[in-house]
Amino acid sequence: MQSARFTITLLITVVLAVSCTDATGPRSRSPLAGLDAGIQLDSAGNPLTPPVGPVAPGYFHGTVRGPNVPGIGGDTLGTSPRIANVAVKAFPIVAQDGANLTLGPLAASTTTNAQGKFTLPELPGGAYAVTFTPPAGGAYSGVWVTAQANAESHLWPWWVTLQRN
């Protein structure tokens, strides 16, 4: 597993709140796989309570990017480099004890295209650790994040930022 500082980098990149309404009424949602924006995290950034969402299969998709080279302008989603050939893998979380996760076997995988875009195949509903591993010898380090696959997880594309080596 990668260190927690990489997870924090990823979460800062993708967390934006939007409103939606479901059977329980209106609530604020995060685009990160439909996680509730108000979910409480422990000191390592892991959810203390299961994310809310319809229990059903779902999938994750988005774009993997790197930060701009210092001095060439603002670091925006529109100007940041997209990273091709990043291995994206999803592993079910079978147990969690604080910051320690027990992962099941590989559930799905894909590779980013030339524009850094990825779509993982549909997964059974549940909690997953998703890893992003750039090509060996490149300029970037990998990251991982936990997310909940559910009937709404595809509604918010991810923007995943890899840290420069």
Image (cartoon, rainbow, N blue to C red):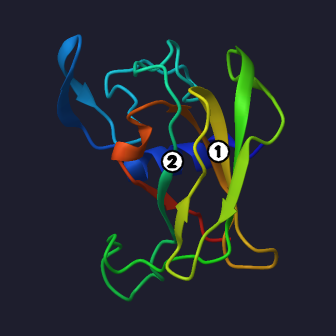
Of all residues, the one furthest to the bottom in this rendering is: 72
The secondary element bearing badge 2 is classed as: loop
Is disc 1 surrounded by few (<14), some (14 to 19) or many (20+) residues within 10 Å? Answer: many
Q: Residue at x 56, y 27 (%)?
A: 125
Q: Position of residue 126 (x, y in %)?
A: 59, 25
Left or right: 19 with respect to 60? left
The vertical placement of 137 against 1, above or below, is: below
Amino acid under label 1?
Answer: Val
Number of marks in the image? 2
**In front here: 150 or 66?**
150
Left or right: 42 with respect to 97? left
Is residue 130 visible to the viewer in this orientation of the structure?
A: yes
Left or right: 71 with respect to 1? left
The image's mark for residue 130 is 1
Q: Position of residue 91 (x, y in %)?
A: 73, 38
Q: Position of residue 105 (x, y in %)?
A: 84, 36
The secondary element bearing badge 1 is classed as: strand
The image's mark for residue 101 is none
Question: What residue does disc 2 label?
Answer: 60
Do the residues bearing badges 2 and 1 touch, measured as CB atoms within 8 Å?
Answer: yes
Q: Residue at x 32, y 71 (%)?
A: 76
Q: Residue at x 54, y 29 (%)?
A: 45
**In front here: 111 or 42?**
111
